[in-house]
Amino acid sequence: MSISPERSTPTWLTIFRLLRWDKPAGRLILMLPALWAVVLAARGAPPLALVGVIVLGTLATSAAGCVVNDLWDRDIDPKVQRTRSRPLAARTLSVKVGIVIALVAFGCAWGLSLYLNPLTFWLCVAAVPVIVLYPLAKRIFPIPQLVLAIAWGFAVLISWSAVSCNATAAPTPCLGTATWLLWGATVLWTLGFDIVYAMSDREDDRRLGIQSGALFFGAYVSHAVGIFFAGTVLCLLRLSVVMSLGLAFWIALTIATILWVWQYYRLCQKTIPHRLYAQLFQQNVAIGFVLLVGMLLGARG
């Protein structure tokens, strides 16, 4: 397989699309839990250099994950309207080029991880198999969104440990109750928004035999999403008590809760416009930023 000679798009732009950098929402929604963790672990005053490493690391990791996903799905994506124009599906880039780009992205993430402490470094290493095997989960596991959610959870553990698990830290566990509450909130939130995203692909997934939480929960999928969002709120409520977060966080969480209730209400309607699923996914990016501001201000209070 080789790069199509008929392609008129510049190669750099095709690679840009392969990395999904033309669709920033998916990059931001992975970055948000990592930023939540570094802000909370540092009590609202994270080192700027560490924030930079985390931002670049999430960009590199999400880019690698997108390429790996497209390599796995290069023969499936052409059969789905939403994905048929992806570079590997459209054969505008070769498999060899895709593998090289994935290795470069993972290499960049590895280089950035060397800045971190040993525990954080090994958490980065542990996340790689989850990222690589997630596309396989869509073929054999009934709720592959759970595998993605666990990958998102690593963003919390990596960022939190980067702040707390260092040589000068107190001899108490550096990943404590607050860490795991944020991890639980992230996993449940990811399950919710990614199942919403998958609801738009139900017919294609059913036709192609692809596993999906949107299919697994069937007629109860909207209620499942509502439960996942409710679990997110409960974890964040408990987190706010454990960390004694200030008023700003409570305001942010109230806004997020109202929006999640509204999303659940919309998903329970008998007739749902197909565009709504993407809109709700985008809205979760905004919700994530609202929570980030609340955490940044509330942790200082």
Image (cartoon, helix red, strand yellow):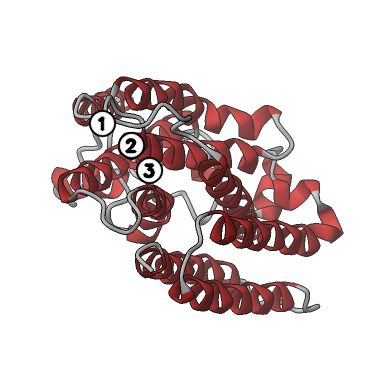
Amino acid type shown at disc 1: Ala
Q: Earlier in the sequence, mark 1 or mark 3?
A: 3
Residue in the foreground of this view, choosing between 189 and 206: 189
Q: Earlier in the sequence, mark 2 or mark 1?
A: 2
Mark 1 Cα shell of 10 Å, populated few (<14), some (14-19), many (≥20): many
Identify residue type, mark 2: Thr
Query: Could you say which disc has been placed on residue 61 in the image?
Result: 2
Disc 2, SS? helix
* Label pair 1/3, CB-CB below 8 angstroms: no
Q: Which mark is residue 90?
A: 3
Disc 2 versus disc 3: nearer the observer: 2
Q: Position of residue 152 (x, y in %)?
A: 49, 42
Label 2 with label 1: CB-CB less than 8 Å: yes
Is residue 88 something that shows in the picture? Answer: no
Mark carried by residue 144: none
Give the residue displayed 36% in from the left and 30% down from the top: 165
Q: Quadrant of the C terminus?
A: bottom left
N-terminal-most mark, 2 or 3: 2
Percent position of residue 78, x then y: 49, 43
- Assign a secondary structure to mark 3: loop
Nearer the observer: mark 1 or 3; the answer is 1
Please tell me the numbered disc located at residue 109. 1
Which three-letter amino acid code belongs to the residue tagged 3?
Answer: Ala
